[in-house]
Amino acid sequence: MKMDGKSSEMHILESDGIVFSKDDTGKLRMSLDGTDKGVVRPVQCYPITRAGRYVAIHDSDDKEIGIIQDISALDPESRDVISEELKFLYLITKVHGILNVTARYGLTTWLLKTDRGVKEVHMKDRGDIRFLPGERYIFTDGYGMKFEIEDASNLDDVSRAYLMAET
């Protein structure tokens, strides 16, 4: 594949040569086939539908080193280290109810009952709400934070009415 005259190929990393660890400052580091790659950043290619699969690894200059097809194939210690990093990077708050929805000045404000307490979430438009199979919804607020309704059919009647009116 060519992009802007440069060759771009997907480089799959073999899991048996990868070791993840944290340095003294808590940053994620990677060793590949015995070579220290320094501080790295994992990027989920499909964070919602295939968490833990197809994880791109970027170096400190944000250049892609390669892609891990499935982190479950890593050694247990490395798998635990990268899993914790991914949980931190892709924190998704679970929504248990919708208490109120108001629109003002081009923003829609949702008052949500979540697993982290009541949260006020501001969204620009309906494009910030993503519908997925199984009555699942992902909201992305103006700060990029994610809020998930795992199954809208489990919401109370008032919450479902707010959701249906706004999606």
Image (cartoon, rainbow, N blue to C red):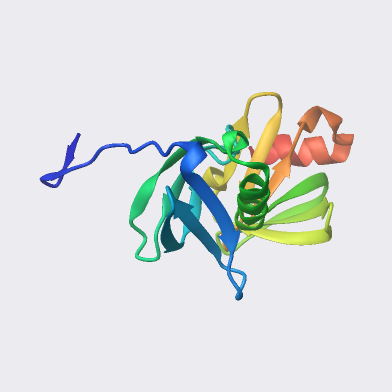
Q: Nearer the viewer, residue 91 or 148?
A: 91
Q: Is residue 77 left or right of residue 115?
A: left
Q: Nearer the viewer, residue 144 or 80?
A: 80
The image quadrant that residue 71 belongs to is: top right
The image quadrant that residue 165 belongs to is: top right
Look at the image and tell me in which quarter the C terminus lies: top right
Look at the image and tell me in which quarter the N terminus lies: top left
Residue at 86 percent across and 40 percent down: it is 158
Residue at 64 percent across and 53 percent down: it is 81
- Check the image and name the residue furthest to the left: 5
- Check the image and name the residue furthest to the bottom: 25
The answer to whether any part of residue 96 appears in the image is yes
Q: Is residue 48 above or below residue 103?
A: above
- Check the image and name the residue furthest to the front: 34
Residue 35's x, y, as percent? Answer: 40, 56
Please give the count of numbered marks on the rendered protein: 0
Residue 122's x, y, as percent? Answer: 64, 60
Q: Nearer the viewer, residue 74 or 56?
A: 74
The answer to whether any part of residue 45 appears in the image is no
Residue 56's x, y, as percent? Answer: 44, 45
Residue at 39 percent across and 36 percent down: it is 12
Q: Is residue 123 left or right of residue 57?
A: right
- Check the image and name the residue furthest to the top: 134
Q: Is residue 32 left or right of residue 48?
A: left
Q: Is residue 135 left or right of residue 71?
A: right
Residue 24's x, y, as percent? Answer: 61, 74
Q: Nearer the viewer, residue 89 or 142?
A: 89
